[in-house]
Image: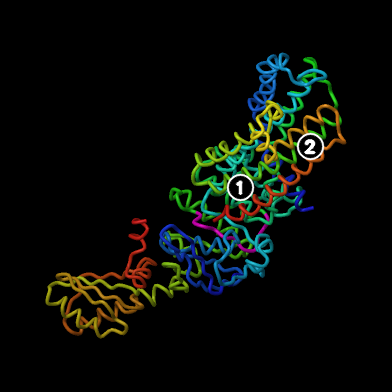
Amino acid sequence: MIHARNLVRTFKTKTGPVEAVRGLDLDVREGELIAFLGPNGAGKSTSVRMLVTLLPPTSGSANVGGHDIVADPAGVRRAIGYVGQKTASGAYHRVREELVNQGRAQRMTGEAAKKRADELLGMLELESLANRDCASLSGGQKRRLDVALGLMHTPRILFLDEPSTGLDPHSRANLWEHILRIRRETGMTIFLTTHYLDEADTMAERVMIMDNGRMIADDTPEKLKADLAGDTIRLILSSDAQAEAAQTAAATLPDAREITREGSAMRVTLSHGEAMLPRLITMLKERGVEVAGANVTRPTLDDVFLGLTGRSLRETALAA
Amino acid sequence: MAFLNDTLLSFRREIGPTMRSWYYILFGVIQPLLYLALFVPLLGAMPIGAQGSPLQWFVPGMVVMLVLFTTVSCGWSLTEELMSGSFERFLATPMSRPAMLVGRALKELAPLLVQAILLIVVAVPFGLTLHPLTMLVGLALLLVFCIGVAALSYALAIASKEDGSLFYLVSHSVALPLMLLGGVLLPMEIAPDWLYLASRFNPLAYLVEAERALFAGELFAMPVLYGLVTAAAVAVVGLWIGALTVRKASL
C-alpha cells in the first residue's frame, strides 16, 4: 500500500541546509495500522507530507496506493484521506457544507457527497452540529470533523498526522474509539504519526520509530520492547548481603543485563520477565535467600527509544 | 471540465458565508452610494468630457477603482486558511490548483461587480447615459483583469504567509502607484510628459482607457482592443504565478 525508497527532504534555511528526512525506506501492507513515532523534529511530518504529495521529495521515490508520488500526485490524492496537524475545516463554513465540499473536491457527485456526509455525521457523532459554523466547535469536535473530512471519499489509506495532540484525555479516548471502529468496519490502512507513546503502543500493530530524519526501528510494539528494552524484575530482600547474593544468582539467568542494587533491593533487566521471576525465586530459595517482595515491570516504548538513542522520548518532547 | 467544476466548487464554498451575513450585503450596497454622494457632486464642475455629462468619463474610473482596490488585498482572506489546515486540506485533494484560485477570486469579484452595476444604475439619474451592452463588456473585461490581480494577491499572501504586515506593505506600495499612474481618477493626458510616458508601461492605464471607450458606447475601438490584450495578459501571467506559488503553500 505504501512503499518508500530512500526518500530525502532537505530544507534551505538561513543557517544552511537542514536534512529533515535522510533516506527513508518503508513498506506498509494493506490494512495495517502503523504508528510513526518520534520526538518533535524527527522528520515524521515531513515524511508524511511527502507521502501525501504536499511536499515534493528532494530525492528518492515513493508509491502510495499504487501511484507514484511524483509522477501521479492526483492519483495519490484520490487514494488517500489526509488529516493534517491543524484544523481542516474553514472557520466560517458550516459543518455539513464542508463535508459535502470535501466530497466534491474528491470528485464525488453531489448526491453521493450528501449521503456520505450524513453517514459520517452519524458515525462521528456530529449530527447535532451539522448546521453550525465550524469555528463554534470544541477542540474534540473539530478533530472528529477533521477525521470525517479525511474519510469522505472512503479512501483506502488514511494518514493521520498527530490526530490527538492538544486534546483532553476524554476527547482523545473518544476520537480513538471512532477511528478504531471505522477501521474494524472498513479494513482501511492507517498511517499515524504521534509523539504519544501510549497511543502508539496500544493502537498500532507496527511501530516505526524515527529520530533525526532516519528510521531507527520498525516492528511490533511487543517485539521492539522485548528486543530493545526487556522486562525488569525487582526483588526486595531482607538484607544488603542477601541482595548481593540475589545479584549473583540473577547474573546466571539467560539474557540478563543491567543488574543493579539499591540497599536490600535489586533489579535485573531481561527478556521474558514473567517466566524468569519464579525461576529466580526458586534458585534463591535453594541458596537459602528468602525473597520478601517481587514485581515485574513491562517496558514502554520510551524504554525502547531510550535503549536506541540514549535519550528519553518524554524528555525530548518536553524540551521541544 | 474538471477546471470548471473545481472553479465552481471553490466559488460556491467561499460565497456561502458571505451570503449568510446581512451586514456584509448591507455595506456592499452602501459603498457605491457613498461614492456617488461624496464624489459625484464634485464632478459636475470638472472640465472633462467634451460631450455629455462628466459622469460618462468618471464612472468607469470609479468602477475600476471600486473593484480593483478590494481585489488587490483579497489575498489577505487566504491567510487565515493558510495558517489553519483548511487550504492544505484542499491541496491534498485532486482539485485543480488554478481553479482553487479562480473560484476564490470570483467570490471576491462577484459582490464587487454587483456594486459596480449598482453604481452605474444609480448614476443614470445624475446624467450618465446607459450603454448596456458595451458596459457589460466593460465589466467582463474588468473581471478578467481582476482575476489575474487576485491570483497575484493570493501569490503574495502565500509568499508572505508568516508576516501579515508584509502583505499589506507590498500590496499597497504596488497598488497605489499603479492606481495613480493608471489615470483612474484624472486623465493622464493632462500629466507632464514623463508621467504620461510612465503610464504607458502600466497595464492598468490600458484597461481604464478601454473601460472609458466602452462606457461611452464604443465597442470596435483601438483602446478596447488594447484593453482586451492587457486584461488577458494580466490574467494569464497572474494565474501562472499564482499556480506556481500554490505549490509552495504547503511547504
Q: Amino acid at mark 2?
A: Ala
Magenta-colored span: A153-163
Could you tell me how far apart the alpha carbons at marks 1 and 2 are, in whole angstroms? 23 Å
- Label 1: chain letter: B
Q: Amino acid at mark 1?
A: Ala
x and y, in percent, of residue A109 in the image: 76, 51
- Label 2: chain letter: B
Query: Residue drawn at (49%, 56%), measured in percent from left and top?
Result: A162
Q: Residues within 10 Å of mark 1 (few under 14, many from 20)?
A: many
Query: Residue drawn at (59%, 52%), measured in percent from left and top?
Result: B88
- Disc 1 on helix, strand or loop? helix
> In the picture, which quadrant includes the C terminus of chain A?
bottom left
On screen, residue A127 above or below A255: above
**Residue with the mark numbered 1:** B155
On screen, residue B42 above or below A71: above
**Residue with the mark numbered 2:** B140
Query: Residue drawn at (28%, 84%), measured in percent from left and top?
Result: A253
On screen, residue A125 above or below A284: above
B150 lies left or right of A91: right
B17 lies left or right of A317: right
On screen, residue A13 above or below B62: below
Between A111 and A66, the one nearer to me in the picture: A66
A159 falls in the magenta region: yes
B158 lies left or right of A218: right
